[in-house]
Image (cartoon, grey):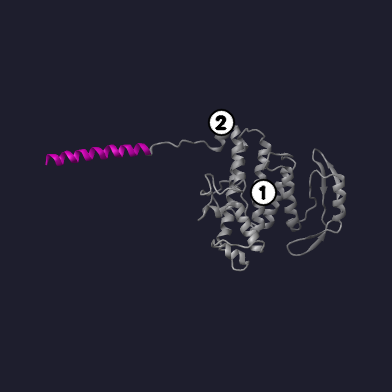
Amino acid sequence: MIMKKRFLILLLCVSVFGINSCTDDLNTEPIVELTLEELLASDPNAVEGLVSRLYASFALTGPSGPGSSDIVSPDAGEGAFLRAILNLQDFTSDAMKNRWGDDGLDQLTTTSNWDRNNKFFRLFYDRAYYTIPQCNNFLQALEVADVPDEENIVAETRFLRALAYYNLIDVFGKGVLATEENFGQSEPLPEATRQQLFDYVESELLAIEPVISLTSSYGRANRYVVDMLLQVVFRQYCSEKSIDLVMFSNVDEKDFASFNNQLEHYPVTDVNGHGRKAAKVSLETMESQGRMIGIQFK
């Protein structure tokens, strides 16, 4: 009996100490508690790593290797942005033949045996709407931060967001217009039409075109990249609204003359098949902008 009591007392002491130990472990604090604003305030040069992370969202699946994923995906590799573009744009057009056995790809390759429930549509949609809020959050933080080359960093971030929206327009034709202005809003945002998304992308690109750096380090956007996306956007969607002027920088006299000759009979067709012809353009010299081409549509 004495031995039994001693055993019970010992067991009770071990349990008490064990509970105290677990409780102390639960009381630990996170190693990192910095918000984006606090991080940039304490280390302004951290902005370069944050921008790199935004670029990485177009190429990598997640922050810690090929097995990680920023979005919910049964296979991390299936949720990469570039792979989603390849799946939805090339497999569905017969431009490629599929030899993988992944569920969903065979259906896309047939160009007829797929519907909106195909998982690759959701993975692409989720991937685009991972990048967009990250850009919004970063832009909000930059409003109160003091970082090197801030104006250009803001322009780059806005470009990356516009690029994500362009791909949404191209694949889905509609979506939700989430910006830094409504970031964190608790109520669901209304659906935006193709036209509304186009107007937003157009306004963003035209706003940052004169601001973003003319040159950049390898792999980063500059003014030429912005002009390229503007050209793609206008070529595909310009006739969905009345556009008076399309601007492209750094065109010399020779290129302008050649372009103008070709443009005289250049047809512009909208999504409904209605054709329009572009008038000849005028060459203007804009302050601090270099040469600009204005394309006026009739």
Q: 274 or 113: which is nearer to us?
A: 113
Residue denoted by label 1: 162
Q: Residue type at mark 1?
A: Ala
Image location of residue 293, percent across then percent down: 82, 48
Asked if the residue at tag 2 contacts the one at tag 1, i.e. Cβ–Cβ closer than 8 Å, the answer is: no
**Which residue, as the protein is rendered here, is positioned at the far bottom?**
112
Answer with mark 1 or mark 2, whichever residue precedes in sequence.
2
Number of marks in picture: 2
**Which residue, as the protein is rendered here, is positioned at the far front?**
99
Residue denoted by label 2: 42
In which quadrant is the N terminus drawn?
A: top left
Residue at left offset 86%, top offset 51%: 258
Which structural element holds mark 1?
Answer: helix
Q: CA distance from mark 1 to mark 2?
A: 29 Å
Image location of residue 216, percent across then percent down: 70, 39
Q: 197 or 292: which is nearer to us?
A: 292
Q: Is residue 47 left or right of residue 10?
A: right
* Magenta segment includes 269: no
Q: Residue type at mark 2?
A: Ser
Any part of residue 10 in sight: yes
Image location of residue 227, percent across then percent down: 74, 47
Crowding around mark 2 (Cα neighbors within 10 Å: few <14, some 14 to 19, many 20+) is few
- The kind of secondary structure the magenta stretch mainly shows is helix
Which label belongs to residue 84? none
Residue at left offset 76%, top offset 65%: 273
Which structural element holds mark 2?
Answer: helix
Image location of residue 114, percent across then percent down: 59, 66
* Magenta segment includes 23: yes
The residues colored magenta run 1-25
Q: Is residue 82 left or right of residue 10?
A: right
